[in-house]
């Protein structure tokens, strides 16, 4: 591609509306342009990256037997009303009314629709298991679009759905997709961590999020490495600040301010503590006594008994017993505000500030707390048994990292097939509800995540697998040297014949502008053609990732580049 016949729209100044690195660089390099809040046009440079990523995703999905199809963006609203997700999604759903006064939504996801389709198309166990996938534009009416394409109102997504008759078949496919996602992100060159996640919005039993570490992320992960085994726990998501009934994943305004203050992140290790609930004395002002203690620590019962707050013998409570006493489940909100609960904190924690809290070993989602601000008048005593000091050497300590969720997989089981009465014949002739899995990748979002992990002060650093162009030819004084012209177009045409994605900068621009634009866009390899090196029958080769350069003979440049692209 010749730039003189292309659209290359770079920007010199930092865009005023862009706060995150990825948003800034995508605008500056001419990948996207804002149309309205949360709505962007993909310009040619950006679309080439989108297409390259889609190609990798599509190849990996086809490799495991996935079947590609596409469903309509418009979905009848009654599908969502039937599933109960109409109220759950609420105002995030885009709605539109046709000329017949019938209401539709622009789909943010397609579980209801795919289940209705499969109900009509699949009738026997012999047709299962099956994996269907699509790559499509989705819609979500974000309350506050931000960070460019990281949280936009219109986004590109690959979603896949699997159908089964047995749980073992579903688990096998789930594991295959789990490994496939790792392969996809490895091929793209994205560094990820995987965390067990909440199934609340989709339903089902088990789900995993694939997170890309980034200073601009909206999620907060706690990562520990003990004995070379990495543990990842999700603390909370910034997006939950705008949703109701999210007490378990977001509770503290202090933790929200911590998330948005880069200076606080990773300055110290955060310990994991847990809440243990006990029954208080009869006729006490408190109904429940909660202990806050380091995870896996042994409790010194004698010290707690001295407070004269508990029944004898000491009774540890589970969630069912807590619900019977309080009339509701125990959450951090209740511990902070309820007059029916008294909090005892281990003395060893008094000098610390931030902790990750886990309620009764049951929460998969943890909450960041600040002892100084989140609790009012707790009791501080020694409640940890310190007789066996070696017991505490393996206490996990966590570092906090921001991250961007780029993919999510779910074991939906029978949630949607039950609602839609979608059944399939088993080998014995009886019918059973389909068991389902759901597997999503945010195509557009992971582009931003990649940039967040791969940039320098000059611009984006693409790798050869997803770069908009693999090689750029930069001729010096193209119009003033016949030798430069001849060699430039010879190399350019040769690369095209070899199906190498090559860009030729044939503009009448200053050398500094040409170099600056190509470094901003992030093309992996540059070939610089000048009279100086042509006099030695050579060209200069430059690699973007490490800014190294080599002088390569002209007759070897094609083999040299091919070897780089292998």
Image (cartoon, rainbow, N blue to C red):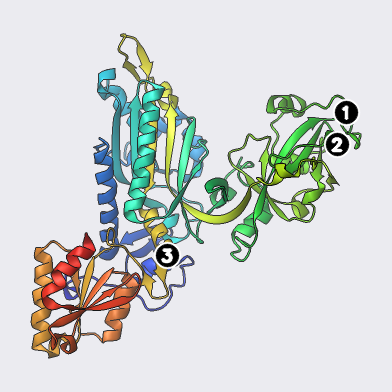
Q: Is residue 156 visible?
A: no
According to the picture, the residue beneath numbered tag 1 turns out to be 281
- Per the rendering, the mark at residue 416 is none
Q: State the residue in front, 90 or 446.
A: 446
* As drawn, 277 above or below 417: below
- Per the rendering, the mark at residue 304 is 2
Residue 326 is situated, as x and y percent measured from the top left of the image, at 76, 29
Q: Secondary structure at mark 1?
A: loop
Residue in the picture at 60% in, 42% down: 246
Q: Secondary structure at mark 2?
A: helix
Marks 1 and 3: CB-CB under 8 Å?
no
* Of marks 3 and 2, the one in the foreground: 2
Q: Is residue 416 visible?
A: yes
Residue 218 located left or right of residue 157: right
- Characterize the local packing of mark 2: few (<14), some (14-19) or many (20 or more) Cα atoms within 10 angstroms: some
Residue 71 is situated, as x and y percent measured from the top left of the image, at 28, 38
According to the picture, the residue beneath numbered tag 3 turns out to be 23
Q: State the residue in front, 364 or 48.
A: 364
> Quadrant of the rendered structure where residue 266 is?
bottom right
* As drawn, 414 above or below 24: above
Structural distance between the alpha carbons of marks 1 and 2:
13 Å
- Characterize the local packing of mark 1: few (<14), some (14-19) or many (20 or more) Cα atoms within 10 angstroms: some
* Of marks 1 and 3, the one in the foreground: 1
Residue 257 is situated, as x and y percent measured from the top left of the image, at 64, 59
Going from the N terminus, do you reach mark 1 or mark 2 first? 1
Q: Secondary structure at mark 3?
A: helix
* Of marks 1 and 2, the one in the foreground: 2
Going from the N terminus, do you reach mark 3 or mark 2 first? 3
Structural distance between the alpha carbons of marks 3 and 2:
53 Å
């Amino acid at each position: 591609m010749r730039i003189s016949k292309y659209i290359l729209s770079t920007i010199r100044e930092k865009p005023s509306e862009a706060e995150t690195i990825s948003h800034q660089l995508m605008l500056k390099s001419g990948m996207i342009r804002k149309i309205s809040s949360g709505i962007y046009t993909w310009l040619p440079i950006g679309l080439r990256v989108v297409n390259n990523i889609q190609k990798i995703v599509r190849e990996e999905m086809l490799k495991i037997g996935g079947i590609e199809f596409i469903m309509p963006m418009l979905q009848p609203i009654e599908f969502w009303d039937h599933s109960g997700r109409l109220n759950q999604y609420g105002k995030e759903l885009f709605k539109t009314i046709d000329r017949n006064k019938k209401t539709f939504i622009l789909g943010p996801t397609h579980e209801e629709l795919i289940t209705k389709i499969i109900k009509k198309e699949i009738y026997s166990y012999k047709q299962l298991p099956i994996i269907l996938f699509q790559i499509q534009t989705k819609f979500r009416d974000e309350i506050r679009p931000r960070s460019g394409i990281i949280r936009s109102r219109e986004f590109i997504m690959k979603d896949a759905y699997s159908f089964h008759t047995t749980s073992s078949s579903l688990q096998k496919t789930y594991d295959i997709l789990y490994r496939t996602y790792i392969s996809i992100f490895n091929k793209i060159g994205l560094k990820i961590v995987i965390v067990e996640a909440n199934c609340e919005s989709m339903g089902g039993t088990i789900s995993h999020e694939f997170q890309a570490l980034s200073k601009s992320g909206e999620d907060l992960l706690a990562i520990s490495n003990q004995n070379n085994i990495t543990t990842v726990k999700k603390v909370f998501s910034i997006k939950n600040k705008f949703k109701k009934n999210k007490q378990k994943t977001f509770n503290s305004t202090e933790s929200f301010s911590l998330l948005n203050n880069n200076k606080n992140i990773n300055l110290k290790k955060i310990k994991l503590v847990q809440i243990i609930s006990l029954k208080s004395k009869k006729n006490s002002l408190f109904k429940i006594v909660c202990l806050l203690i380091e995870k896996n620590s042994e409790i010194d019962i004698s010290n707690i008994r001295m407070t004269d707050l508990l029944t004898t013998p000491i009774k540890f409570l589970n969630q069912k017993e807590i619900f019977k006493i309080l009339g509701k489940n125990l959450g951090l909100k209740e511990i902070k505000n309820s007059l029916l609960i008294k909090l005892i904190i281990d003395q060893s924690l008094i000098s610390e500030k931030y902790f990750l809290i886990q309620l009764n070993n049951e929460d998969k989602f943890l909450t960041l707390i600040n002892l100084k601000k989140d609790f009012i008048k707790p009791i501080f005593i020694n409640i940890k048994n310190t007789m066996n000091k070696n017991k505490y050497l393996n206490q996990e300590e966590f570092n906090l990292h921001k991250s961007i969720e780029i993919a999510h997989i779910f074991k939906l089981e029978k949630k949607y097939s039950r609602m839609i009465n979608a059944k399939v014949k088993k080998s014995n002739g009886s019918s059973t509800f389909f068991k389902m899995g759901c597997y999503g990748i945010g195509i557009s979002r992971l582009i931003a995540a990649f940039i967040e992990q791969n940039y320098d002060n000059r611009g984006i650093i693409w790798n050869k697998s997803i770069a908009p162009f693999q090689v750029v030819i930069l001729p010096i004084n193209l119009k003033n040297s016949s030798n430069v012209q001849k060699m430039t177009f010879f190399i350019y045409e040769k690369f095209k014949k070899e199906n190498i994605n090559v860009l030729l900068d044939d503009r009448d621009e200053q050398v500094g502008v040409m170099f600056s634009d190509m470094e901003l866009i992030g093309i992996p390899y540059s070939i610089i053609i000048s009279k100086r090196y042509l006099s030695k029958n050579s060209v200069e080769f430059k690699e973007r990732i490490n800014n190294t350069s080599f002088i390569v003979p002209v007759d070897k440049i094609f083999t040299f580049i091919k070897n780089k692209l292998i």
